[in-house]
């Protein structure tokens, strides 16, 4: 059994990722490291400050020192720090959104709709996709939709409302021509079927991230 240290900044992402491990990650054991203040810090300090980066690194090092075989950074706002983390640890470190981003660009669709529940994640996703798009010599368009209300609904325990709002966001992107949708945060994976029922292809990060870990760890 390979142990994976999972770095979370919100409890709402724990359940969907554990479900992905259960369904796709046989012989992988997730070990959760959660600090919900990491998200609040970004809002309070207006972005990824030096202090926010230090606290994030401390959590990662705690995971590594717990003798895990790999680290999965499950907070998309902190995923841009993964290349930095790799310089300091001896185990594989995966950004949860990276496999999904690569996969969506491998698809034949040409207009990618990104749904997020906070502005930072939407901006990061678009920036990463645009950069990957250019490096591959592709000309796919990336459009985004942020639904803050969906995050609040999930915090209040209203999963049905959360999924409804994600579906509405997907519908708006489809009206703008999006022919494939990605759900930019783990916590949104619970709405995947709602979006799929609209008749559009949809990708979420938990499944793609766990499958990447299995390949890396030789399982």
Image (cartoon, rainbow, N blue to C red):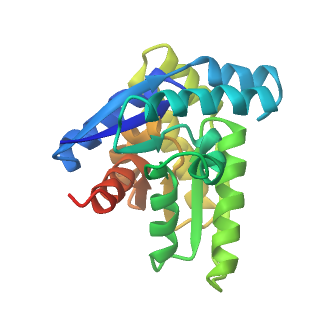
In the depicted view, which residue is nearer to us: 200 or 118?
118
Q: Quadrant of the N terminus?
A: top left
- Nearer to me, 68 or 120: 68
Q: Nearer the viewer, residue 171 or 6?
A: 6
Left or right: residue 119 compared with residue 18:
right
Identity of the residue drawn at 50% across and 40% down: 166
- Could you tell me which quadrant the C terminus lies in? bottom left
Q: Residue furthest bottom?
A: 137
Total count of labels: 0
Residue 74, percent from left and from top = 49, 39
User: Residue 115, relative to residue 61: is it above or below?
Assistant: below
Q: Residue 160 in the image: x percent, y percent?
A: 39, 26
Residue 136 in picture, x, y percent from top left: 61, 82
User: Quarter-wise, where is residue 212 in the image?
Assistant: bottom left
Looking at the image, residue 199 lies above or below residue 32: below
**The quadrant where residue 17 appears:** top left
Q: Residue at x 62, y 33 (%)?
A: 57
Q: What residue sits 37% from the left and 56% below the top? A: 208
Query: In the image shown, does 124 or 55 lie closer to the viewer?
Result: 55
Name the spot of residue 140 as percent of width and height, x first: 63, 76
Residue drawn at 53 percent across, 32 percent down: 61
């Amino acid at each position: 059994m390979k142990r994976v240290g999972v770095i979370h900044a919100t409890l709402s992402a724990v359940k969907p990722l554990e479900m992905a491990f259960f369904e796709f990650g046989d012989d992988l054991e997730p070990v959760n490291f959660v600090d919900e203040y990491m998200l609040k810090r970004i809002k309070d300090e207006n972005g990824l400050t030096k202090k926010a980066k230090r606290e994030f690194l401390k959590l990662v090092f705690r995971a590594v020192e717990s003798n895990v075989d790999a680290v999965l950074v499950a907070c998309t706002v902190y995923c841009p720090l993964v290349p930095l983390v790799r310089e300091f640890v001896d185990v594989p470190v995966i950004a949860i959104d990276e496999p999904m981003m690569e996969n969506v660009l491998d698809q034949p669709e040409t207009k990618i709709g990104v749904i997020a529940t906070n502005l930072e994640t939407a901006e990061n996703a678009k920036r990463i996709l645009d950069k990957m798009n250019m490096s591959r010599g592709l000309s796919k368009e990336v459009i985004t939709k942020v639904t803050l209300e969906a995050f609040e609904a999930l915090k209040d325990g209203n999963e049905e409302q959360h999924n409804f709002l994600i579906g509405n966001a997907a519908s708006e992107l489809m009206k703008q021509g999006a022919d494939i949708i990605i759900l930019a945060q783990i916590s949104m994976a619970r709405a995947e079927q709602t979006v799929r029922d609209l008749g559009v292809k949809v990708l979420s990060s938990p499944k793609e991230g766990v499958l990447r870990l299995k390949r890396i760890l030789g399982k």
